[in-house]
Image (cartoon, rainbow, N blue to C red):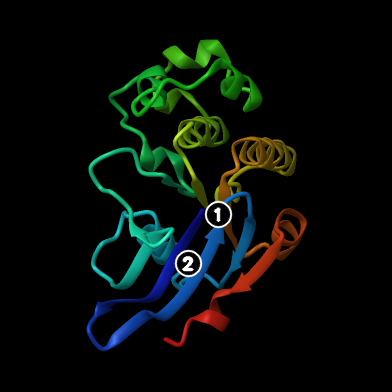
Amino acid sequence: MRLKGEDISFGYKKNNLILNEVNISLKSGEVLGLIGDSGSGKSTLCKILSGYENMYQGNVTIDGKKIPLNRYNPVQLVFQHPEKAVNPKWKMKDILNEGHEVSNKILGSFGIKQAWLNRWPNELSGGELQRFALARALGPQTKFLIADEITTMVDAITQAQIWSTIIDISEEQNIGVLVVSHEKKLIDKLCHEVIYLDDINTA
């Protein structure tokens, strides 16, 4: 299975493109790194590939077919700031199981404590919230995970724990992972291949 973005162009203004004719491909089970400077368009590309941004030119497909919009999205995006991706009026157990019931195995892998399930989002740290976001994203129907600077806000030990769990689960479920970061050491350690956004973007 392969996720492709072909000839992706995007700009907030007509004559000011952030992305211009970008081509990127991620296959099942692959861990691909994407490096770019702040403001280079990394997050915009992530949103396009995962269906969060629709006002672009080009095509995003899985095995040549458009991604269906009316059911569970097989391309899951996890953001740098997990607090922006949760409903503050929901308890964590409701947020966690919104799309599917997350297994105890996944919860245990991410070190999510049962006591946290009855808490509100503002009662958890950023690192704890990010564990929930990832546990929710790595569902049985997920085929690709786009991780946009997801461990920038956590300490080195937590970062290593989180990435170890992501890699283990993605290998077990044959999920393709796009690791988006400006930390070259992290990218080199995790990824099979690395792409520089400047090399594929002519904007």
State which quadrant residue 44 falls in: bottom left
User: Considering the numbered disc 2 on the image, is that residue within a helix, a strand or a loop?
Assistant: helix
Residue 139: which numbered mark, if any? none
**Residue 53: where, in percent of width, then height?**
29, 60
Amino acid beneath label 1: Glu
Relative to the observer, which residue lies in front, 154 or 35?
35
**Residue 197: where, in percent of width, then height?**
54, 75
The residue under label 2 is 42
Left or right of 42, for residue 159? right
Q: Residue at x 55, y 54 (%)?
A: 149
Relative to the observer, which residue lies in front, 96 or 31?
31
Q: Which image quarter holds the C terminus?
A: bottom left
**Residue 136: where, in percent of width, then height?**
46, 31
Q: Residue at x 55, y 48 (%)?
A: 150
Relative to the observer, which residue lies in front, 115 or 33?
33
Badge 2 crowding class, 10 Å Cα cut-off, few under 14, some 14 to 19, many 20 or more, is many
Badge 1 crowding class, 10 Å Cα cut-off, few under 14, some 14 to 19, many 20 or more, is some
User: Considering the numbered disc 1 on the image, is that residue within a helix, a strand or a loop?
Assistant: loop
Amino acid beneath label 2: Lys
Left or right of 122, for residue 126? right
Left or right of 31, for residue 40? left
Relative to the observer, which residue lies in front, 75 or 118?
75
Task: Give above or below for 11 relative to 183.
Answer: below
Q: How far apart, in angstroms, are the residues tagged by discs 2 and 1? A: 10 Å
Q: Residue at x 38, y 61 (%)?
A: 61
Residue 149: which numbered mark, if any? 1
**Residue 90: where, in percent of width, then height?**
31, 22
**Number of on-image labels:** 2
State which quadrant residue 30 falls in: bottom right
Residues at circles 2 and 1 in contact by the CB criterion of under 8 Å:
yes
Name which of mark 2 and mark 1 comes first in the sequence.
2
Task: Give above or below for 202 relative to 178.
Answer: below
